Amino acid sequence: MSPKYDDIPAYPAGLRLAGRKVVMVGAGTVARRRLPGLVDARADVLVVAPDATPSVEAMADDGELRWERRGYRADDLDGAWYVIAATDDPAVNAAVEADAEERRIFCVRSDDASQASAWTPASGRHDGLQIAVLAGGDPRRAAAVRDRILEELREGTLGAAHFRAKTPGVALVGGGPGDPDLITVRGRRLLAEADVVVTDRLGPRALLDELPSDVEVIDAAKIPYGRAMAQEAINNEIIKHASAGKFVVRLKGGDNYVFGRGFEEAIACAEAGIPVEVVPGITSAISVPAIAGIPVTHRGVTHEFTVVSGHVAPDNPDSLVDWAALGRLRGTLVLLMAMERLGVIADTLITHGRAADTPVAIIQEGTMATQRTLRTTLATAAADAQTAGMRPPAIVVIGEVVAVAERVRPL
């Protein structure tokens, strides 16, 4: 066996393992961590171990890899390109390493990096980049450096510009409930690449300050019961800039397709021949109650939750909601855009079967520093909200989960 010296640096290389045999000896926690990357690389993975963790067994059952339920044999390495010795028995790992060395197959050892012919780097992915860090056999140090690089890439503090032309088009990005930390990683990355951002007032506004000065920001805010940019005008702005060869991000609060009119924008782009990518966002209907300490479902309390727009009154002929059916339901009811009509909505629900003393929570400006919560009942919700000065944007949660949530105080 060739000597291994910790002070000799490893030579980094990216292995292209698609369709090539890789052998994992052992199926415990190390295998659980390493196997997904090998499967993603489309390697032909053979796992050899008498027993396996449930996750590894599930991967075998799903056909993502082959699992031989037995001990290791030297001929397991026949035809292999890469080997990982990951058992809890050093003698078995040493035998795997020796057999791999004899066959000139690079081998990783989970128990003794100094005796391995290859090391597994701490790795991660971001925007088409693969980050891999080796730290001379110190895996915790490597992981710490990797995490720092990925964090800065995702936050935009470490530049990684594309040196190729951007493809004109539109990304419909759901920005989440308001806190800039709650936008998705992909949403934040696309925002950083935008030439034009068309935003509304409920999007994560703090992220706009991070945009380069040459990015055009278009205010498409819809103020409740006040000024608003017409949806047709918003569609036209998006299409105009994308047609001019620019990459446009339509940044909205919550999720584009949960009362966000995002699909109208997607249809308009499709009709104009503009390619569209949809990036889902965390909807405020679930996230805002959660941040306020209220689960929309809880075992033994409710088996359902319903999200309803309250922007049209129950007695309005344009309403598409079966309010009578909602009154008969026992589960959680989450109302969006309902503050102006909360009184008539509550009365309608009570008329059709909801108990007047049903617990209610009204959460204003959820996830933001100005968040506040009012706990009340269905019968008194409208009056209590007016007295407390509650105003949009606010989420209304109706149901026994509100009472259950009183047992726990959010951090």
Image (cartoon, rainbow, N blue to C red):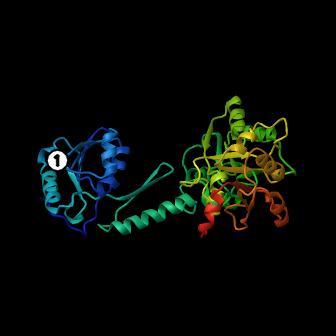
* Quarter of the figure with the N terminus: bottom left
Q: Position of residue 309 (x, y in %)?
A: 74, 45
Query: For the residue carrying disc 1, how many other residues have a C-alpha within 10 Å: few (<14), some (14-19), or many (20+)?
Result: few
Residue 395 shows in this picture: yes
On the image, numbered disc 1 is attached to which residue?
70
Q: Where is residue 387 in the image (x, y as percent from the top left)?
A: 85, 65
* Foreground pick, 404 / 170: 404
* Foreground pick, 4 / 92: 92
Q: Where is residue 78 in the image (x, y as percent from the top left)?
A: 16, 42
Q: Position of residue 2 (x, y in %)?
A: 14, 60
In the image, residue 396 sits, relative to residue 3, either above or below, namely above
Residue 259 shows in this picture: no
Residue plotted at (78% across, 42% down): 234
* Quarter of the figure with the C terminus: bottom right
* Foreground pick, 172 / 245: 172
Residue plotted at (63% across, 52% down): 191
Q: From the viewer's perspective, is 97 left or right of 201?
A: left
Q: Which residue lies furthest to the right in this view?
A: 226
Q: How many labels does the image show?
A: 1
In the image, residue 307 sits, relative to residue 181, either above or below, namely above
Residue type pointed to by label 1: Arg
Q: From the viewer's perspective, is 71 left or right of 220?
A: left
Q: Residue 322 sits in which quadrant?
A: top right
- Classify mark 1: helix, strand or loop: loop
Residue plotted at (73% across, 52% down): 355
